[in-house]
Amino acid sequence: MGGALHARPVTIVGGGVAGLTAAIALRRRGAQVDVLERAPAITEVGAGLQLSPNALRVMQALGLLPALDAVSLPSRAVVLREAAGAQVVRLDLARHRPGAPFRLIHRARLIEVLEQSAREQGVTIHLDRTVEIPPEAPLLIGADGLHSRIRAALNGREVPFFTGQTAWRAVIADDDDTPEAQVFMGPGRHLVSYPLSGGLRNIVAVLETRDWRDEGWSHPDDPANLRGAFAGFGGPVPGWLARVDAVHVWGLFRHEVASRWQDGRMAILGDAAHPTLPFMAQGACMAIEDAWTLAACLDATPDQPAALARYESLRKPRAARIVAAANDNARNYHLTGPKRLAAHAALRLGGKLAPGAILSRFDWIYDFDPVTEMS
C-alpha cells in the first residue's frame, strides 16, 4: 500500500480491539504507529463476542482471517427461545447468506491475534503508560473506550443515562460446541449463550432492575445472584448457571453517539465514539469498521483535517443507526404480558412462512463492506 500515510507518525491511545485494529490498518498503509496502553500488559476480561461478516471483511483485508479461524468457531444460527426453553424461531445465518461467515470468539483470543499482527508489522506498543493528551502528537487517535479522555477533550463532559438494566457475564467449561447462539427471553430479562473454542461457553444475562450498578466489565459478583435472577429459566440454562464459579456484573448505560469525532488533529473511534448496548453484537464490529475507514481516509489525501472530516461523515450515520437498533432490541427481548405473547407468536409465524425475512431486516448491517466502500 502506501500513499498519504507513508512514514507519517500516528499516536493511538488504547490497546483494545479498536486501537490495535487501527494500528494494523494504519501501519499497513505505511504510517509509523505508536500505541499507548495504560495497562502493564494487553489483556481482556474473559468474555466472548460475535464477529459478523461486515467486520470479517476487514479482517480478511488485513490478512487476519486464518489466524482468527484457528481460535474461533463458526456461528450457523441464532435461536430465540422462551425462558422455559421452547423454541420461538431459528434464524439460519448460514442459509440466509452462504459464504458470509459469522464467528464466535473469546475476546482475549481476538486481542492476541491483533497484538501479534501489530507487533510483527512494526507497530510500537508502549505499556504501563499513564496517558495524558500528548500536545506534540500531530495525529492522535482516541481508542480509549467508554471513559475516553480524547472524547472528553473533543466534546466536554457528558453524563450517560442508566438504563435500569444490569448485565452479568461469565465463561464456563462446556463440551457442547453446537455452532449457534441461543437467546432465552423472559419478562424483564434475557440470557444469551454461545460456544467458544477450547471447550468454553460464553454467557451474558441481562436483568431489568432499579438497583444501580457501576459501568464497566471488571466488577466481580456472587454467582448466586445470577442464579437467583434466572432461577425460572429452563432448558440448558440451569445446568449452565450451576457451573458458573466466577461472574462479573455491570450496569448498562445509554451513551449518545459523540457529537464531535475529530478536530483535524485528534479523532476517536470504537467505544470512545459510539458506545452501544450489547443487543446487536456490533460493538467490536463497529470498532473494526471504524479502523479500516479511518486509515483509508487518511491514506487518500495529505490534507489531514479533510481526511478526518470525511471519516466522521462516513461513520457517524451508520454508528448512530446501529446504536438505535441495539436500543430497540433491549426492549424487544424483555416484553411482558400480551405484548410478549403477540410478539413471540408473530416470530413463530414469520419463521414458518418467511424464515429469511426476519434476518433480512438486518441486511444493512451484515452486507455492508467497509473495504469496497473505501476502494
Image: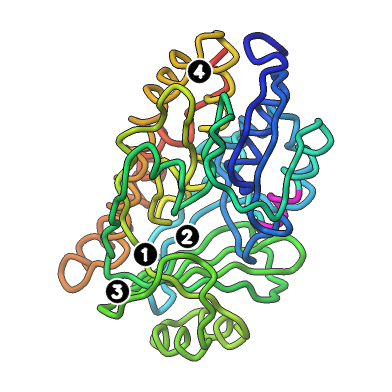
- Is residue 145 or residue 191 the one in the foreground? 145
Q: CA distance from mark 1 to mark 3?
A: 10 Å
- Is residue 174 or residue 338 the one in the foreground? 174
Q: Position of residue 302 (x, y in %)?
A: 56, 8
Per the image, the residue denoted by label 1 is 252
Residue at 28% across, 62% down: 344
Residue at 67% across, 24% down: 9
What is the magenta range? Answer: 107-112
Q: CA distance from mark 3 to mark 2?
A: 22 Å
Residue 112 — which label? none
Q: CA distance from mark 4 to mark 2?
A: 31 Å
Q: Earlier in the sequence, mark 1 or mark 3?
A: 3
Residue 231 location, quadrant: bottom left
Residue at 62% across, 65% down: 45
Between circles 1 and 3, the one closer to the viewer is 1
Q: Position of residue 68 (x, y in %)?
A: 73, 44
Q: Amino acid at mark 2?
A: Val
- Is residue 334 or residue 22 the one in the foreground? 22
Is-magenta flag for residue 180?
Answer: no
Q: Quadrant of the C terminus?
A: top right
Per the image, the residue denoted by label 4 is 373
